[in-house]
Image (cartoon, grey):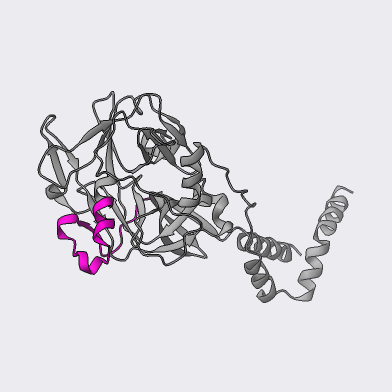
Amino acid sequence: MWNWLAKLMVIAALLGSACRAQQEINKPGYIIGPTNDIERLGDLDAGRANIPPEVLERAIKSSILTVTEMYNGKQSYCSGALIDGRNAGDLPRIITNHHCFAHKNSSTGRSLPQVFAEACEETSVYFDFSVKKEPMKRSCARGSLVTNYDADFAMFSLDEELPADYEPFKIWVGEVPPNRAAFIIHHPNAKESKQGREGEEMLKGTGTYFPKKVITVNNCRVLGRFDERFWSQQDNLPFGLRHTCDLVHGSSGSGLIDVASGRLLGINWGGITMKIDGVDRKDNVASSSEFLREFVDSGDITSPPIPPPRKDFTSCAHLAGHAAMPHEFMLLALFAPLFVALRRRLSRS
């Protein structure tokens, strides 16, 4: 009898394991593909990239680097995009990521809702690293920073106007169709993106090397939104737009730009590795333009309802239907608690 009870416990454990959720996220992180499609702007074959010249020129001028001088003497870098002021006549704004200005959990490294004290107060914006001269610089207008933790957006106004040839990005209207060709102008860490010293530019006034603009356009396409079954596994996946464009540290906050129109399809925040039915899947992710437009217009976002985690009942049914369970075992499974109680009673008597 006790042998049957041991078998029961083993089968129950197998069933329990099979009925656990079959998807999990291993860890967040930036993804570079096997061919490293981040390249210097000077190396770009414009004809092969199929980006209209006017779209590329506007995107280069309006893709920016934010540098926040931290009180510990270090700098915090992120990429970003120039957008219009909220109302006609207002100073233009910058859109980037919340996590560029946020404290981090010391154990997980994940960003927290709280921004650090230097955010905006010590933040500068640099516009042009593509020419051999001191880049144009602006600052974050004091008190203008607003962020959204859930979708990983941050937005602030500039403290000065810009020359007329710096044209803010427009935002894609409606749902972004899958397989849409895209590109990214960003400022990744030169070492991690394999750009070396040529991927950096020294600021003459400070003697500090900052990352220069680069482009990702090869193998760069939109894959679509995340399936609802993954939403409960990470805070910003309900807002996420999957794509194949290479990113690395420093690319955070850059615009995912539509090749044909030059409109923003989303704002990049990184990449994730997900384990789905035992197989790793890598995705680069931007928060989608649907939520970006709402945030830019109101400074807030209406979060979609998150469905409860679902279990993979197919796997449960598969195991239950194919496990070798004789009829007598099934009867034992039903009456085992009664047998145990009866044995205890007899042993006491």
Residue 172 percent coordinates (x, y): 44, 54
Quadrant of residue 35 in the image?
bottom left
Q: Can the viewer see residue 95 in this picture?
A: yes
Q: Is residue 218 above or below residue 294?
A: below
Q: Is residue 53 magenta?
A: yes
Q: Is residue 219 above or below residue 152?
A: below
Residue 322 percent coordinates (x, y): 66, 76
Q: Is residue 226 magenta?
A: no
Residue range highlighted in magenta: 29-58
Tell me the quarter of the image containing the N terminus: bottom right
For image coordinates 15% across by 60% down, the residue present is: 43
Quadrant of residue 320 in the image?
bottom right
Q: Seen in the image, is 298 located left or right of residue 187?
A: right
Q: Can the viewer see residue 108 in this picture?
A: no
- The residue lying toward the viewer, choosing from 20 and 43, is 43
Residue positioned most to the right: 349
- The residue lying toward the viewer, choosing from 161 and 15, is 161
Quadrant of residue 252 in the image?
top left
Q: Seen in the image, is 335 located left or right of residue 39?
A: right
